[in-house]
Amino acid sequence: MWEPLTQPAIWGVIWTALGETLTMVFVAGVATVIIGLALGVLLWAGARGGILPKWLDGVVNVVLSWIIVNITRSIPYAILMLALIPFTRLIVGTSLGPMAASVSLTIGTVPFFARLVEAALREVDRGKLDAAAVMGSSRWQLVSKVALPEARPALVAAITTTVVTLVGYSAMAGLIGGGGLGRLAYNYGYQRFEVGIMLVVLVIMIVLVQLIQFIGDRLTRLVDHR
C-alpha cells in the first residue's frame, strides 16, 4: 500500500497536484469575492426596505435574485461544470487545466457567496443606516462607510466558508480535466487502487481546509471590534 510513496517521482506529482488545486482555489476565490460581493450588496440594497429606489426593487428581485442567483444555485455543481465547457473554451481557449476549471468554480460559487454577503448585511443595525441617511449620506456612503464596515466580521466568515467550499469543488473539477488533488485521487486512488496515495491526498485536503478555517477564524476575531 505504501510502496509507491517511497518513489521520489510520485511526490513530485503530489506537489504539482497541490499547486494546481491552490491555483484553482486562489483564482476562483478572488473572482468570487469581487463579483459575489458586488452582487450581494445589490441583493441587499434592492430588497424590500433597502436603500435603492422602490422602482428598482422588482428589477433586482427578478433579475438578480431569481434568475441569476436562485437558478444557478439550483444546478448541481457537477452538472454545471459540464454545461459550462463551451463557455469555458470561449473564455480561456481550453476546457482543461486549473485556469479553465476556475471559470466553472467561479460561476458555481458566486451565487452562494452573494447570499452570504446579503445575509451579513441584513444583520447590520438599521438604526445606524437611518442615522447616516439623516445626516445626508449618499447610497454609496451608506454601503461603503456603514454597511460593509459593520458587517466586516460576518463577511470574513463568509469568505472563509466560501473558500472551504471551493476546495471541495476543486476536487470535483479535477475529474473533468481541471487537474489538482481531485484528479490525482481519481487516477491513482480509484483507477489504480493505490490506497496509500489516496490517503495522502485526503490528509492534504483535510490539512488545507483546517488551515483555511483557522486563518479565517483568526481574521474574523481580529476585525470584530464589537
Image: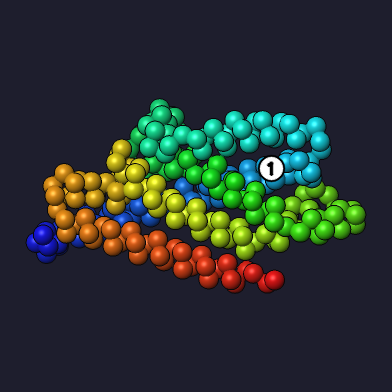
Q: Which is nearer the eye, 75 or 183? A: 75
The amino acid marked with disc number 1 is: Leu
What residue is rendered at 69% in x and 42% in y?
Answer: 42
Q: Examine the image and state in which quarter residue 195 appears.
A: bottom left
Query: Can the viewer see residue 35?
Result: yes
Decide: is 114 above or below 16: above
Query: Can the viewer see residue 93?
Result: no
Horizontally, is 71 left or right of 81 in the view? right
- Name the quadrant of the C terminus: bottom right
* Residue most extreme to the left: 3
In terms of secondary structure, where does tag 1 sit? Answer: helix
The way the protein has been coloured in the rendering is rainbow
Q: How many marks?
A: 1
Q: Position of residue 12 (x, y in %)?
A: 21, 58
* Residue most extreme to the top: 86
Horizontally, is 149 left or right of 95 in the view? right
Horizontally, is 210 left or right of 115 in the view? left
Q: Position of residue 190 (x, y in %)?
A: 19, 46
What residue is rendered at 29% in x and 52% in y?
Answer: 181
What residue is rendered at 44% in x and 51% in y?
Answer: 165
Decide: is 221 above or below 113: below
How crowded is the residue under tag 1: few (<14 C-alpha within 10 Å), some, or many (20+)?
many
Decide: is 20 above or below 217: above
Horizontally, is 81 left or right of 14 in the view? right
Q: Position of residue 14 (x, y in %)?
A: 24, 57
Q: Which is nearer the eye, 17 or 50? A: 50
Q: Which is nearer the eye, 144 or 157? A: 157
Residue at the disc numbered 1: 42
- Name the quadrant of the N terminus: bottom left
What residue is rendered at 70% in x and 45% in y?
Answer: 44
